[in-house]
Image: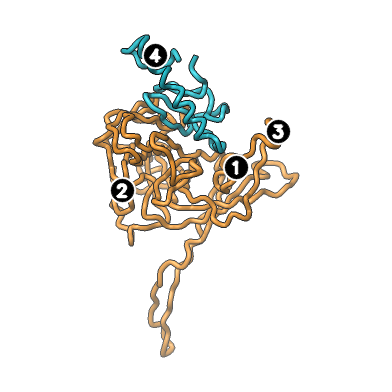
């Protein structure tokens, strides 16, 4: 199915994962630049996405006027992509600690309790990918999903007010999202390897239309294992590039994958060199394995 | 009896490296010959030492398992 048109609706999923200094997704590793060979890392599923505001993009414009006439105008490019806010019904202590670069302390305050903090003095919050999934119905009536995949974001918590309000989500949690650009996509592939023809092969986000919701697993090759297990059951066993995407070290690697189990989530693949980064972006309904 | 922090094949361990219960998906680390461990979201400072100890503990056990049933790696794993 090629490019099509359709209509958006809903806020289905939000995923977050760290990115390393080369732009590869690295799950929830707190040390994305030093993960061990043979390790597997999964994107974090943020519970209860309520909404995400639109980015406050500003672009420059010059107008020409003389002799009492408008003589034209010219756009002068992006001035600021701006930030936006995501709101979640739930406050997730693990997610909050991951995006603020802190730790959810489940020991010191009592083993039944947890301490978290906003890490206010950390200037550079952990950088990661953010995937926001909304519904998409094609003009022919087929239901699909459209993912806004931000290539490089930081998040800052915005705590809810304390109130006595009743009704829906009276004290929802919010995060200010500050996007930056990246030359690499969540597939592990550089933007130059996608045929999207963006200027400088660098951008803030990509959109990805799929039949199913998606999840992301990264595996660091140990040069011996011929299987790794993704986070949730994939809907399809495809490993030939129909709907699931496998990459190794920044290149499409479907030829090196010979199996993908819809029950165990295990791949069967040819081991690559130690340290090579595998990324699997696959359709799922988030059924636990 | 296999250490509850050790997984083998497609059988996940009961506990993380830090001895904590967890829900999947969970980050994992291969430690050789089909064995792996589940990583804590916030690993303790001695996590790598524990992983190294678990890895070291496998060597004699793997040898023993192979002596019992050299053709059945999975049964060897579950017997530890």
> Label 1, label 3: how many angstroms apart (C-alpha)?
15 Å
Tell me the residue that label 2 is attached to.
A3
Tell me the residue that label 1 is attached to.
A103
Circle 1: is it few (<14), some (14-19), or many (20+) Cα within 10 Å? many
Which secondary structure, mark 2? loop
Q: Earlier in the sequence, mark 3 or mark 2?
A: 2
Which secondary structure, mark 1? loop
Residue A147 image offset from top left, x and y in percent: 42, 45
Tell me the residue that label 4 is attached to.
B65
> Label 4, label 1: how many angstroms apart (C-alpha)?
39 Å
Which secondary structure, mark 3? loop
Tell me the residue that label 3 is attached to.
A110
Q: Which mark is in front, 4 or 3? A: 4
Are the residues under badges 1 and 2 in a single subunit?
yes
Q: Which mark is in front, 2 or 4? A: 4
Query: In this rendering, would A166 be left or right of A239?
Result: right
* Residue at x 42%, y 84% (from the top left corner): A65
> Label 4, label 3: how many angstroms apart (C-alpha)?
41 Å
Callout 2: chain = A
Q: Earlier in the sequence, mark 1 or mark 3?
A: 1
Q: What is the letter of the orange chain?
A: A
Q: Which mark is residue B20?
A: none
């Amino acid at each position: 199915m090629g490019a099509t048109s359709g209509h958006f609706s809903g806020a289905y999923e939000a995923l977050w994962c760290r990115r390393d200094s080369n732009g590869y997704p690295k799950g929830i590793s707190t040390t994305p630049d030093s993960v061990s060979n043979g390790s597997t890392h999964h994107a974090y599923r943020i519970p209860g996405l309520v909404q995400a505001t639109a980015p406050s993009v500003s672009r420059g414009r010059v107008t020409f006027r003389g002799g009492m006439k408008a003589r034209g105008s010219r756009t002068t490019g992006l001035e600021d992509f701006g930030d936006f806010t995501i709101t979640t019904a739930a406050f997730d202590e693990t997610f909050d600690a991951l995006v603020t670069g802190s730790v959810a302390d489940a020991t010191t305050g009592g083993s039944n309790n947890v301490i978290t903090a906003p890490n206010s003095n950390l200037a550079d919050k952990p950088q990661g990918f953010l995937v926001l999934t909304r519904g998409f119905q094609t003009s022919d009536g087929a239901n699909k999903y459209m993912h806004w995949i931000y290539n490089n974001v930081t998040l800052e918590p915005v705590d809810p007010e304390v109130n006595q309000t009743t009704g829906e989500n009276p004290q929802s949690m919010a995060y200010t999202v500050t996007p930056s650009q990246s030359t690499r996509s969540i597939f592990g592939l550089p933007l130059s390897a996608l045929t999207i023809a963006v200027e400088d092969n660098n951008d803030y986000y990509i959109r990805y239309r799929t039949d199913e919701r998606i999840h992301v697993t990264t595996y660091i090759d140990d040069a011996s294992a011929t299987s790794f297990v993704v986070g949730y059951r994939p809907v399809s066993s495809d490993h030939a590039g129909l709907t699931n995407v496998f990459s190794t070290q920044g290149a499409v690697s479907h030829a090196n994958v010979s199996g993908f189990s819809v029950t165990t989530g295990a791949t069967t693949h040819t081991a690559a060199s130690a340290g090579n980064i595998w990324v699997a972006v696959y359709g799922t309904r988030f059924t636990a394995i | 009896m296999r250490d509850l922090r050790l997984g083998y094949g497609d059988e996940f361990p009961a506990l993380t490296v830090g001895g904590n219960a967890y829900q999947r998906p969970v980050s994992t680390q291969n430690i050789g010959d089909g064995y792996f461990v589940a990583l804590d979201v916030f690993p303790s400072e001695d996590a790598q030492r524990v992983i190294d100890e678990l890895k070291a503990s496998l060597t004699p056990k793997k040898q023993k398992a192979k002596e019992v049933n050299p053709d059945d790696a999975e049964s060897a794993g579950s017997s530890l």
